[in-house]
Each structure stands twice: as C-alpha cells, then as structure tokens.
Image (cartoon, rainbow, N blue to C red):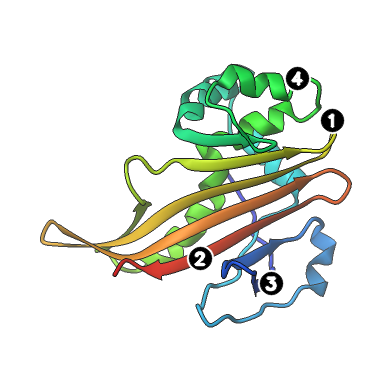
Amino acid sequence: MNWELIESECLLDKDNYYIINFINHAEEMSNVRDMSTKNDIEPSSCESVYSFMTKLHNSYKNLNQINKQFRVDYPRIVCHVNNIRLKNSYRFLTEFKHTKLLMCAKLLCTQSTFFPIFSILYDKYTQPFDDIHFSDYSDDNHVAVDFKIYSEKKMHVTLKKNFRIIKLIDGDISVLKIISVKIIIMFGKNKYIRYCISECSEF
C-alpha cells in the first residue's frame, strides 16, 4: 500500500496518550504546526478519512478478499458495538445491516488498519539499529475495536492495540518499551482520524 504522509500536530490527551492529529483536507496543512512533547513522539499523519478508507479498500483485489480477511481477523479482535460485546461475526454484520457503514466497519476489523502507524513506529524505533525490533506485545494480543453507531451514516470507532520494542542479544529478548496505539475515527459530517500513542518501559 502507498500511504502519503502530511504534517500534523502532536498533543497530550487526558489519558496521557500523545495524539497525532489527522487532517481532513490537504489544504489545511498550512494551518497546522508541530508541537514537541516530553515523550519526544515525532508528529506524523495520514491523509483524510476518505483517502484512508479508500486506500484501505484498494489494498484488497476484490470484495471476496475483503470478506475473507474480515472472517479471518474477526476472531482475533475484541469487538463492541454500542457497548455490547459481539463475539460472532454474523451478529456484527446484523448490527450494520441498516446503515451505509458496513464496508467501512468490515475493513476496520482487519489488521490492515494498523499498517500506516506500524510503519511509522517501526521506522522511528528500529532505524538504524539491526538488533532493535518492533512487534506485537504478545501472541494473544487482540485488537480492541469499539463502534458507536449514531445513524446510518455516522459512527465513532476506537481501535486499540499494544506493541513492544525489543532488543535481541545473542538470542535473548529484552523488552525495552511497550507502545499502546489508539486509533480514533469519526464518520459523518465532521470526519476526522487520530492516532494516539502512549509508551512505557517494561520494568
């Protein structure tokens, strides 16, 4: 996938996540300024919600691939829709039956959603060190996905996933940091997308 990066601002939210704001329109770039943080998380961003979802959609060859990936990834996530845990993908599809958001919802349940931020963080923490690696926090590290449906065209989505920065020394693994990533996307009249990042030491 080709993801174009634009400038953004990095802020601190109430839960001590560093917010990387995503701008809806490229022409707004001139109004955005970079802000340093005590955690030294470099500001990075992606394009508009529309462009983000379009590129996510186009990363699959056809609808069958999207549906197949959705079925494969759904058991790997912990999904809530309007505060109700949905373990069954059929129930999930039923919740979106009367909306125009089903395709977006299915795409956001796939692991491809984290590709842009994974790439950014991978470069930030591993380059140019050959012995530093960026990986999942654990084998059972499920993505938490929370959907709030407000109308047939409006919803709020929050995705959370943990990663770790590890160092390999003579085959031994040392965990340097735990990185928690939160993706917040709003669909509707006022669209926006944010990446929120929190990091802490393992010890």
Residue at 61% across / 50% down in the picture?
3
Q: CA distance from mark 3 to mark 4?
A: 36 Å
Mark nearer the N terminus (4 vs 1): 4
Mark nearer the N terminus (2 vs 3): 3
The residue to which callout 2 is attached is: 198
User: Quick check: marks 4 and 2 in contact, CB under 8 Å?
Assistant: no
The residue to which callout 1 is attached is: 152
Q: CA distance from mark 1 to mark 2?
A: 32 Å
The quadrant in which the N terminus is found is top right
Residue 10's quadrant in the figure?
bottom right
Find the residue positioned furthest to the left: 170
Of circles 1 and 3, the one toward us is: 1
Where residue 75 appears, as percent x and y from the top left, is: 46, 27
Find the residue positioned furthest to the right: 189
Q: CA distance from mark 4 to mark 1?
A: 9 Å
Mark nearer the N terminus (3 vs 4): 3
User: Of residues 67 and 76, which is closer to you in this image?
Assistant: 76
**Mark 1 Cα-neighbour bin, 10 Å: few <14, some 14–19, many ≥20:** some
Q: CA distance from mark 2 to mark 3?
A: 16 Å
Where residue 173 appears, as percent x and y from the top left, is: 19, 59
**Mark 3 Cα-neighbour bin, 10 Å: few <14, some 14–19, many ≥20:** some
The residue to which callout 4 is attached is: 97
Give the SS element for disc 4: loop
The residue to which callout 3 is attached is: 9
Q: Tell me which amino acid carries mark 3.
A: Glu
Q: Tell me which amino acid carries mark 2.
A: Ser
